[in-house]
Image (tube, rainbow, N blue to C red):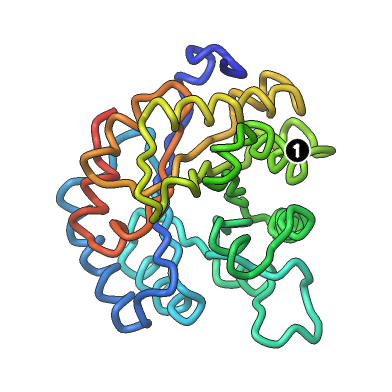
Amino acid sequence: MTGTDPAERAGRSVLVSGNWKMNENHFEGLRLVQELAAMLRVTGIPEGREVSIHPPFTSLRTVQTAVETDRVPVALGAQTCHHEQRGAFTGEVSAEMLAKLNVAYVLAGHSERRTFCGETDAVVRAKVDAILSQGMRPIVCVGETLDQRRGGEAEERVRRQVVDALSGRSSETIGGLVVAYEPIWAIGTGETASVDDAQQMCAVIRDEIAKLAGPGAAAAVRIQYGGSVTPESAGPLLAADDVDGLLVGGASLDAERFVAIVRAPA
């Protein structure tokens, strides 16, 4: 199952995103960016690929300055934002604040936010609205739990998350988004997600987007896979018909490993 003919997406770009999670203070973040810059000057980024890095909020300004000063060929990303632009929301950060730091991509609905912070599908949709309102691109994260997968509810759950986040938006808007599939059931559970598992669910996502916004949007949208990505698994994953990128966790904290993922042959 797929929402479009792969040939229609031959010119699409691939997005590899490094999610630092709650790691790297601003000193460590600066060092990591400098290491990435040095390696990428030597190796470069393959044509048709884009890279984003998503530091913690406390490192954003430092990383932004380093990226812009050293002309590091990566886009600055954030890990989340609040759905309101201003107000009495202690400890929160708005999309407007991120946009002022030249953030290009913001994660919305990451599985850890849904699990540990109680983010509902309605909250994720509101965050997507906020991100778009500030001219940034959301990376909308979707995925199913182990119980949902074992119960035969995986596809239904992922389709519902896609619909709740994206329905009612224009084809142009949806085509410009990024959706990241996270197999929650295979992260820290002892279960393993195969390339076929990734391809199957990314195809489901593309199919649902085709239903929502048409084949043009389905062809244009980029669908990432995020689930314990390594330099060894990156190439086979990127070779899958409906995988347009990778959302990388732990491996993005090691410059050498992350660059190897960025340059993995598809």
Where does residue 213 sit, x and y in percent of width and height?
75, 27
Give 119 or 135, whichever is nearer the viewer: 119
Q: Please state if 96 lies on the left or on the right of 252 as rendered.
A: right
The type of residue carrying mark 1 is: Val
Give 125 or 174, whichever is nearer the viewer: 125
* Residue 117 to residue 255: above or below: below
* Residue 218 to residue 133: above or below: above
- Residue ID at (27%, 33%): 235
Give 55 or 43, whichever is nearer the viewer: 55
In this figure, which residue is indicated by the disc labeled 1? Answer: 163
- Residue ID at (74%, 22%): 211
* Residue 14 to residue 247: above or below: above
If the image is split into quadrants, where does the C terminus sit? top left
- What is the quadrant of residue 232 in the picture? top left
Judge the density around disc 1: few (<14), some (14-19), many (≥20) Cα neighbours within 10 Å.
Answer: some
Where does residue 245 sit, x and y in percent of width and height?
43, 38
- Local SS, label 1: helix
* Residue 19 to residue 169: above or below: below
If the image is split into quadrants, where does the N terminus sit? top right
- What is the quadrant of residue 231 in the picture? top left
Q: Please state if 63 lies on the left or on the right of 157 as rendered.
A: left
Where does residue 40 sit, x and y in percent of width and height?
22, 53
Where does residue 141 sit, x and y in percent of width and height?
58, 49
